[in-house]
Image (cartoon, helix red, strand yellow):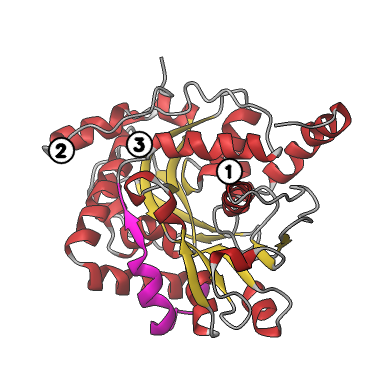
Amino acid sequence: MPATSALRRALAVMAVLPLLTLAACGYGSQAKDDDTAKVAAGAKKIDGLDSVRIGYFGNLTHGTALVGNNKGLFQKELGGTEAKYAVFNAGPSEIEALNSGSLDIGFIGPSPAVNGYTRSGGKNLRIIGGSASGGVKLVVDPDKVKSLKDVEGKRIATPQLGNTQDVAFLNWVAEQGWKVDAQSGKGDVTVVRSDNKVTPDAFRAGSVDGAWVPEPTASKLVAEGGKVLLDEATLWPDEEFVITNIIVRQEFLEEHPKAVEAVLRASVEANKWIDANPEEAKAAANEQLAADSGKALPAEVLDPAWESIEFTDDPLAATLDAQAEHAVEAGLLEEPDLDGIYDLTLLNEVLKAAGRSAVEDAGLGTK
């Protein structure tokens, strides 16, 4: 990608800042602790641990964690070790909690996972499983944008500079042959970085013409009169791309593999239950959202949002690698070394025990 040396130096500096604020679909930066897990009387502790601290976002793309918490699946697998939960609003705070040792395992988007891994030189974190695919859409004002070519010249919101959806939109814009300065968002399309919680207000007020956003924000925009112009899934092979991973502190993985395996068993069981009981799972996820945030999603938002998300144990490693390359091509990330970012050993053991096939790490696994 052509660029002046001065711009490249600026981008190298700027890469650190946006990546510190990466989030798959965050709504802020504070964590909400939830210590309501119930430990069965007389149950045996795993690895001698009093508790395992699990983090996730209060968002439908983290449905595996929402359902796993709501249905007690993590606690069931952990036995006498208490499952403690922390609900985060953005990726940076969850990465910080993992790096500081105040969190053991987390559900998180691909960009924060890449950021956390690369900033530690590959020493602090590992992706150990998948959780969800899809759930990202380009929603527009149908009176202003009637076709994909009409996006040129419009104001389109993304959640944050350099976040997962921002990178995806910039990559799509480049594929259309349009030019946009990644940092300022100015060009043939104006990219407006807008927090997901305020984007529906901006859309309603007409200050943006559309948004490339995750669920449930996309469905909230549709409820405001927006139209889905493009589902990002259609841009990927087999219409699958990672939106949520499971990551772990490397030290915790090395010292407490049985506890990590228990959490992975619960995650696999949660995804299996979601697949077999879609309506009940949707209700359970919404119930947990209400418990975590004090507010459930209305049916007109919940139903289409849930339908667009695929819950999967496969981390879809090749798509994370592609997403990182898109960030490089946009000028928001220096070429990362992702070798070793995945350790799928325990997940594949869990899948094998369940009579299922192993998942791949796209050559980015631990050596």
Residue 362: name its quadrant. top left
| Residue, far left | 355
Queried whether the magenta region covers residue 302, the answer comes back as yes
Q: Measured from the top left, where is residue 325 in percent x and y?
A: 57, 34
Q: Quadrant of the N terminus?
A: top right
- Identify residue type, mark 1: Pro
Q: Measured from the top left, where is residue 51 in percent x and y?
A: 41, 45
Does the CB distance between marks 3 and 1 fall below 8 Å?
A: no
Q: CA distance from mark 1 to mark 2?
A: 29 Å
On the image, numbered disc 1 is attached to which residue?
112
Write the residue at 71% across / 37% down: 331
Mark 3 vs mark 1: which is more N-terminal? 1
In the picture provided, is 316 more to the left or to the right than 148?
Answer: left
Is 203 placed above or below 322 here?
Answer: below
Queried whether the magenta region covers residue 328, the answer comes back as no
Query: Residue 180 or 314: which is nearer the viewer?
Result: 180
Mark 1 vs mark 2: which is more N-terminal? 1
- Give the secondary structure at mark 2: loop
Query: Residue 7 or 116: which is nearer the viewer?
Result: 7
Residue 207 visible in rendering? yes
Is 229 placed above or below 322 here?
Answer: below
Residue 145: name its quadrant. bottom right
On the image, numbered disc 2 is attached to which residue?
356
In the picture provided, is 218 more to the left or to the right than 366?
Answer: right
Q: Residues within 10 Å of mark 2 (few under 14, many from 20)?
A: few
Q: Nearer the viewer, mark 2 or mark 3?
A: 2
On the image, numbered disc 3 is attached to which residue?
260
Q: CA distance from mark 2 to mark 3?
A: 19 Å
Q: Which residues are magenta?
A: 293-312
Write the residue at 19% across / 66% down: 277
Mark 2 vs mark 3: which is more N-terminal? 3
- Give the secondary structure at mark 1: helix
